[in-house]
Image (tube, coloured by chain):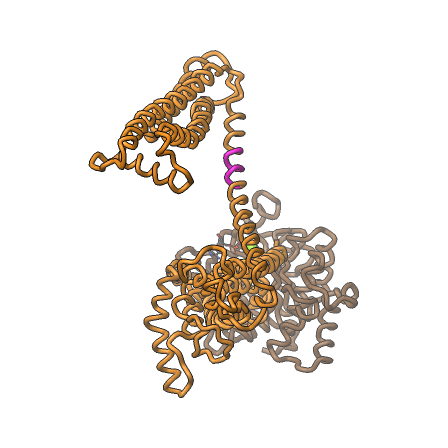
């Protein structure tokens, strides 16, 4: 598939199942994730949103006892296949976590970490450029440009989360996965992140897990509703919220459970 | 004095006190009204009031009575057999005591036989007195405390206060003992430095043998501690060269790579290593390692002695591995999982994650464990006594024998039948003080570092 084609499907999952030891957490999920859109995963706690998200960059590999079956492809390439290197996959599919997790290093080093390990840039000026660029894209540059040598952990929660987004951007990914990126943040910081997502849309395929339905409605074009490990409904966000086809989806978005 | 039956009876009475207190609170009171304290508290209260005052009496009387018995017994001796000094007094008492305990012994004089009989009578009387005073106090306590029980009586508060008092007393005792040890170290060291100038102590020549007899020429001897400090540092260095890489790497393996099952097996095994008595390591060093190292050194044409810094250092290193690994393990485990995930999600390999994120994050904790491990190495005695040797060499050849501060402390106190005021003996305290100061500083720094690092994540 052609990367330049904005309407292209970036990732596909076909009959994906995930098991934690014997317990099945994801049942037969099939979904297409488009490169030019923000896709939201919604659903009650414990329904498997994070689990499925972690399949997309193989972070489930790091969990002992976790087993994934089915086909998941990035640009048509099987990410669980022999030809796929997990290190390269994770450089192409970045991730932002629920709780901001900057490294206990300087702001500069937090951003430079990814480009360094991937050997993307070797000289100092190039690295400075990448750091500046990434921070600008993450909307953090103006706030931190005078204190790049201070510890990343000294920033506020919202700034830390944008630092983590900048850190992911710095390795030039194609997809960014965000697992409830605002759940630890106050409303103002949340609004900033949502603005940022809007700005990043189009440049990266973005998948965001949220249990805040307003947030899903605000930031996403596609929404997938998960319940008890299954993907109940998937479609345009406007359809899901105004005109759900399934009874369970309707119950959830009208607040009947979850 | 027959003290055990009295103690037994006292404990029994206290149990009775508990039962009485609880029974009264349950049966007599709770029928009609709300109780301030639960029956169990009343039980404890009665038991404690029965037990504690009686215990104080018991301790006081059992310290005091033997002295009065001894004095009274000796006073009854005829004038010409009165002891003249502390030594003859002790001799007389010993004879009287053995005469009263063993029937087959011949008394040295009729007066002595008389005294022994006297002694026996007094002893029996004393036991009686002891029993009466202790058990009397206990019974009074029991009666008084059980009659105090009313619905509003605050037995609970009093019992709590007594327990708290007991606990704080224990900690005060622990602190006082420590302070006492440090003070005695200090005072004995001052005595040492009165006899040997500080400059001598800071010299490079260690040869204490000269000081055996104070009338000899050059009786002060040379107490230059530098070779000992050097030897200690040298052996500790060798030990750390063994313990740090192995300990650190095994901690990394255990925290990052080992499966849960592996970890469950390996961690206790490492902890067993920490439980091996150091004398066993010492035996191992002397019997196995030292000869092997000597043979190895000689085969390479190096001047090697049977005791060597290398043998002691290697074995000490093995001894320290578990300390190093378990503390580094804690430091690595304390780094949040989210750091690891964050790094892996950026496409870092596990080893990059360890080197560039986890180790730097855990570094203060690892540094803390490093310092604590060094202070262990410096204070370690048994292995070096057995394997390092006695020669105060300033050598960089690890195949040669060196000696350490701890070895010389042992040597100073076990060397011969000297009095406790010769410099050769007193130097043990000066060395002990030196060691104490070094390890104290190391520990303070280590704890500071570890604490600082804890704050980073909390
Ligand atoms: N590491 C794990 N080991 C075992 N079970 C897990 C693990 N992570 C999640 N689960 C289980 O998988 C299910 C889905 O969890 P998760 O994906 O975290 O849900 P969500 O993100 O939608 O709240 C839950 O039942 C949860 O208990
Ligand atoms: Mg989740």
Q: Is residue B433 magenta?
A: no
Q: Residue furthest left?
A: B104
Residue B438 or A36: which is nearer the viewer?
Answer: B438
Q: Position of residue B76 (x, y in %)?
A: 36, 27
Name the side, left or right, on which B386 lies relative to A138: left
Chain B visual colour: orange
Q: Residue furthest front?
A: B80
Q: Position of residue B59 (x, y in %)?
A: 43, 31
State the residue at coordinates (53%, 33%). Answer: B165
Task: Identify the chain drawn in brown.
Answer: A
Q: Position of residue A187 (x, y in %)?
A: 72, 51
Image height check: is A197 above or below B185? Answer: below
Quarter occupied by residue A144: bottom right
Image height check: is A189 above or below B199? Answer: above
Q: Is residue B168 magenta?
A: yes
Q: Main secondary structure of the magenta part?
A: helix
Quarter occupied by residue A236: bottom right
Residue B203 or B329: which is nearer the viewer?
Answer: B203
Q: Quadrant of ligand 2?
A: bottom right
Image height check: is B168 above or below B124? Answer: below
For the N terminus of chain A, which image quadrant? bottom right
Residue B73 or B408: which is nearer the viewer?
Answer: B73
Q: Is residue A192 at least partly visible in the picture?
A: yes
Q: Position of residue A160 (x, y in %)?
A: 68, 60
Quarter occupied by residue B280: bottom left
Specify start and end residues of the magenta stretch as a single range: B165-171
Q: Residue furthest bottom?
A: B301
Name the side, left or right, on which A207 lies relative to B80: right
The number of callouts visible is 0
Residue B443 or B39: which is nearer the viewer?
Answer: B443
């Amino acid at each position: 598939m052609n990367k330049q084609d904005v309407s292209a499907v970036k990732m596909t999952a076909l009959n994906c199942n995930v098991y934690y030891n014997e317990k099945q957490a994801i049942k037969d999920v099939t979904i297409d994730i488009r490169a030019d859109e923000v896709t939201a995963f919604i659903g009650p706690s414990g329904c498997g949103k994070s689990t499925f998200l972690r399949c997309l960059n193989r972070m489930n590999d790091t969990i002992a006892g976790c087993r994934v079956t089915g086909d998941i492809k990035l640009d048509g390439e099987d990410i669980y296949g022999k030809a796929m290197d997990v290190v390269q996959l994770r450089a192409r599919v970045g991730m932002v976590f629920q709780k901001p997790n900057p490294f206990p290093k300087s702001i500069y080093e937090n951003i430079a970490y990814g480009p360094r390990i991937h050997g993307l840039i070797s000289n100092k000026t190039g690295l400075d450029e990448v750091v500046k660029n990434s921070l600008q894209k993450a909307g953090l540059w103006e706030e931190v440009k005078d204190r790049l040598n201070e510890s990343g952990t000294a920033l506020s929660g919202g700034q830390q989360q944008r630092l983590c987004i900048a850190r992911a951007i710095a390795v030039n990914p194609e997809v960014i996965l965000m697992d409830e990126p605002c759940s630890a943040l106050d409303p103002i910081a949340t609004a900033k992140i949502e603005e940022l997502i809007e700005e990043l849309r189009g440049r990266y395929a973005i998948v965001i897990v949220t249990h805040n339905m307003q947030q899903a409605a605000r930031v996403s074009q596609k929404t997938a509703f998960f319940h008890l490990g299954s993907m109940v409904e998937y479609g345009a966000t406007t359809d899901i919220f105004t005109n759900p086809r399934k009874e369970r989806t309707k119950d959830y978005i009208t607040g009947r459970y979850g | 004095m027959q003290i055990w039956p009295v103690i037994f009876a006292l404990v029994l009475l206290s149990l009775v006190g508990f039962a009485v207190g609880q029974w009264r609170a349950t049966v007599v009171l709770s029928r009609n009204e709300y109780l301030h304290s639960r029956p169990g508290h009343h039980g404890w209260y009665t038991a404690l009031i029965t037990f504690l005052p009686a215990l104080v009496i018991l301790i006081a009387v059992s310290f005091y009575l033997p002295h009065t018995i001894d004095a009274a017994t000796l006073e009854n001796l005829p004038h010409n057999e009165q002891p003249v000094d502390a030594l003859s007094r002790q001799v007389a008492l010993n004879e009287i005591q053995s005469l009263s305990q063993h029937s087959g012994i011949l008394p040295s004089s009729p007066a002595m036989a008389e005294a022994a009989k006297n002694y026996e009578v007094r002893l029996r009387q004393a036991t009686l007195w002891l029993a009466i005073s202790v058990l009397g106090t206990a019974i009074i306590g029991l009666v008084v405390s059980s009659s105090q029980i009313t619905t509003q009586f605050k037995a609970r508060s009093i019992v709590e206060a007594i327990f708290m008092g007991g606990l704080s007393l224990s900690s005060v005792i622990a602190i006082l003992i420590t302070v006492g040890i440090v003070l005695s170290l200090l005072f004995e060291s001052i005595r040492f430095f009165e006899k040997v100038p500080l400059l001598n102590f800071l010299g490079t020549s260690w040869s204490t043998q000269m000081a055996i007899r104070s009338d000899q020429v050059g009786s002060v001897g040379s107490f230059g501690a530098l070779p000992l400090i050097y030897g200690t540092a040298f052996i500790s260095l060798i030990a750390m060269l063994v313990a740090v890489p192995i300990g650190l790497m095994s901690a990394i393996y255990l925290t990052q790579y080992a499966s849960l099952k592996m970890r469950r097996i390996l961690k206790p095994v490492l902890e067993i290593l920490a439980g091996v008595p150091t004398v066993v390591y010492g035996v191992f060093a002397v019997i196995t390692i030292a000869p092997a190292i000597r043979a190895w050194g000689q085969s390479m044409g190096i001047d090697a002695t049977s005791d060597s810094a290398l043998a002691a250092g290697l074995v000490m290193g093995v001894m320290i591995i578990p300390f190093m690994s378990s503390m580094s393990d804690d430091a690595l485990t304390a780094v949040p999982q989210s750091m690891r995930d964050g790094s892996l999600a950026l496409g870092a390999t596990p080893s990059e994650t360890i080197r560039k994120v986890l180790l730097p994050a855990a570094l203060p904790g690892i540094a803390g464990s490093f310092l604590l491990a060094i202070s262990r190495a410096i204070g370690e005695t048994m292995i070096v006594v057995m394997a390092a040797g006695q020669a105060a060499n300033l050598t960089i050849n690890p195949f040669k024998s060196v000696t350490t501060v701890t070895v010389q402390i042992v040597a100073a106190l076990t060397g011969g039948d000297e009095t406790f005021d010769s410099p050769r003996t007193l130097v043990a305290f000066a060395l002990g003080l030196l060691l104490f100061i070094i390890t104290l500083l190391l520990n303070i720094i280590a704890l500071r570092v570890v604490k600082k690092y804890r704050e980073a994540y909390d």
